[in-house]
Amino acid sequence: MRKQMRERRDQLGFSQQDVADRAGLSRANYSHIERGRTEPNIEQMISIAEVLKVKPNVNFFKNYCDNMEQNKTKEVC
C-alpha cells in the first residue's frame, strides 16, 4: 500500500473516485496504484500529485506493506 497517498487523500476528504476523476484515471486504475499493485507512469504520478497537492516525488509513491498484505504474502517488507 502507498500509505502516504491514502493518508493525503483522506486529509483532503477525497474518495478514490474523486482523485481518479480529477487525475483523469479510472477508479480501478487509481485504486491499483494506491494499493501498490501497479506502478504509476510519470504522467500519472504528476496528475495524482497535482490532485493531492503534493510534489511529484518518487518517495511519495513508495510502497509500504500493511499487516493484511504481510499476512497474505508472508513476506517481510
Image (tube, rainbow, N blue to C red):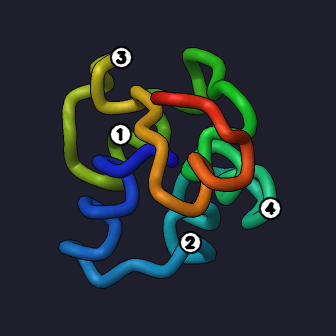
Q: In the displayed structure, does residue 2 sit left or right of residue 16?
A: left
Q: Which circle's residue, 3 or 2, is located before the other in the chain?
A: 2
Question: Would you name the residue on which mark 2 appears?
Answer: 16
Kindly state the secondary structure of the residue where label 3 is placed: helix
Spot occupied by residue 4 in the image (x, y as percentages of width and height):
29, 48
Amino acid tagged 1 = Ala
Name the front one of labels 1 and 4. 4
Label 4 sits on what residue type? Ala
The earlier-in-sequence mark between 3 and 1 is 1
Q: Disc 4 to disc 3, how far (Cα)?
A: 21 Å
Is 25 displayed left or right of 35 in the figure? right
Q: CA distance from mark 3 to mark 2?
A: 20 Å
Pair 1/2: label in front:
2
* Secondary structure under the numbered disc 1 in the rendered image: helix
- Judge whether 52 appears above or below 57 on screen: below
Label 2 crowding class (10 Å Cα cut-off): few <14, some 14-19, many 20+? some
- Element at badge 2? helix
Above or below, 49 relative to 24: above
| Residue that numbered label 3 is attached to | 58
Disc number for residue 70: none
Percent coordinates x, y for residue 34 in the rendering: 55, 50
State the residue position of label 4: 28
Structural distance between the alpha carbons of marks 4 and 2: 9 Å
Q: Report crowding for label 4: few under 14, some 14 to 19, many 20 or more residues within 10 A (C-alpha).
A: few
Task: Report the Cα–Cα distance between label 1 and label 4.
Answer: 18 Å
Residue drawn at x 56%, y 16% as measured from the top left: 42
Residue that numbered label 1 is attached to: 49
Mark 3 vs 1: CB contact within 8 A: no
